[in-house]
Amino acid sequence: MSKNKVLLTDPLDDNNPITVQVLGICSALAITVQLKAAIVMSLSVVAVMAASNVIVSILRNLIPNRIRIIVQLVVVASMVVLVDEVLRAYAYDVSKELSIFIGLIITNCIVMGRLEAFALGNGVWRSFLDGVGNAFGYGAILILVAFFRELFGSGNLLGIQVIPDALYEMGYVNNGLMLLSPMALITVGLIIWVQRSRNRKLIEKG
Amino acid sequence: MNRDSNSYTFTFAALMVLVVASVLAFTAHSLKDLQDDNIRKEKMQNILSTVGINIDREGAENLFNKYITEQSAVQSDGSIDNSVNVFKDVNLALELKKPAEDQDFPLYVAQIENEKYYIIPIRGNGLWNAIFGYISIKEDLNTIKGVVFDHVGETAGLGAEITQDWFKERFIDEKLFDSEYNLMGIKVSKTNNDPSNLDKSDHEVDFISGATITCDGVTDMIKERINHYVPYFKSIKESSNSLALSIQEISKNEIKLN
């Protein structure tokens, strides 16, 4: 059990896909302007990763070795199209907002990385946990970054104003730079800094 | 079974494609109704937003039926065809491909309290793909009440900014026609002398830096589309003028009689 639990908890901290493996940075920059978009993106990635990890793991003894990357790509792509179709039917506004980024889950290095490195060599249940764990690790950072960007960039959280008007009257101004991609990179950098100063294991020797 | 043989690889790939294709086709087909419904309601939402009614997508249908009192297809000679269900059946993208004399020009009329607005769908070309929207005109058939723009694939942060409120607000109260009722359109202009947009009769609004082609597209589509409605607008103006005249005549006669 504990061995399986590690699959879920490890990607949250010690082996986080964004802050430790530095994968999936592109989408972390692109869709973290608003908390809501980041949450939906995270949930979509959870669904895509869990499903494609499970499918590839089921097929792992059948997939011809020479075309395994293509097979993985097809699995991920069809999962992504499914998520996109469902969002367009049930969460139209969000799907308009995320538009091409949903499609770009296909290119998210984390998804293919986990398929190749884990699902091809492990059982279905463990692959499922690994997919969910990594997607949560990715989503946690995404949501954290979006929290700071929306808070300082537009004074809102989930679209609701949280910074009181009184503060604006005293001369406080939203920082427009937070809404631009460079500040997402800097925010991710700060998160990595905080994480490493708390978790000494992560610091490279020498 | 030899997993590395060519025949196995080909069989696997073919089967995979077959399975994936049927799953995706099935999903797309079963969700299509819901997706189309969303698109339809969004269209209602867009039309309503030009006359200042902002409502979520779910409530749009009710208010649309309440406020949009007439829908008709204007013909190029200025006559009206009421037999067409323009909301459902007129696809502006397809109409634009026809010669002007064969096109149906959709017109929605909104009645909100005592105000009457004419809402015209517009469509044109941006930099990468189509841009489109709606423009609503007040009862004087000249002053803009509101606009809404959308696009298929303009550059995010540049051309895509035409959907933003701050850009749409620039059009409010601008005049489309000059004092002789010649169509001037609204020029999205680089050389606008009135950046704070106080002069509402200069037929110009400020430009978006870095979005030259998209902004020119907005200018062009407004002028090109509205131009087709001018004969109809003139006919309304004439009939209301003659109505006003005859009322004047009648009241004059009454005065004489007294």
Image: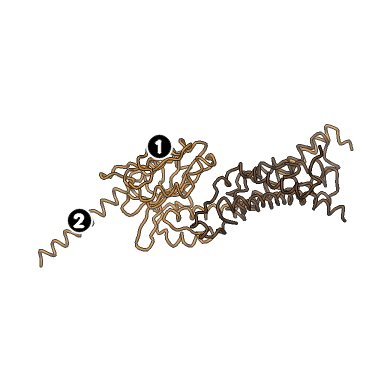
Chain colours: A brown, B orange
Please give the count of numbered marks on the rendered protein.
Answer: 2
Of residues B1 and B170, the one drawn nearer to the viewer in this rendering: B170
Q: In what element is the residue under mark 1?
A: loop
The answer to whether residue B138 is left or right of residue A164 is left
Residue plotted at (37% across, 55% down): B117
Separation of residues labelled 1 and 2 (CA atoms) = 43 Å
Of residues B185 and A18, the one drawn nearer to the viewer in this rendering: A18
**Residue under label 2:** B245
Q: Which disc, if any, is residue B156?
A: none
Q: Position of residue A26 (x, y in %)?
A: 66, 41
Chain assignment, label 1: B
The answer to whether residue B35 is left or right of residue B158 is right
Q: Position of residue A23 (x, y in %)?
A: 72, 41
Q: Position of residue B71 (x, y in %)?
A: 41, 54
Residue plotted at (68% across, 44% down): A189
User: Of marks 1 and 2, which one's residue comes earlier in the chain?
Assistant: 1
Residue plotted at (24% across, 53% down): B241
The answer to whether residue B120 is left or right of residue B37 is left
Classify residue A182 by image quadrant. top right
Q: Which disc, if any, is residue B190?
A: 1
The answer to whether residue B25 is left or right of residue A173 is right
Q: Quadrant of the N terminus of chain B?
A: top right
Q: Is residue B120 visible?
A: yes
Chain assignment, label 2: B
Crowd around label 1: few <14 · some 14–19 · many ≥20 (10 Å): some
Classify residue B109 by image quadrant. bottom left
Amino acid tagged 1: Lys
**Extreme bottom residue here?**
B258
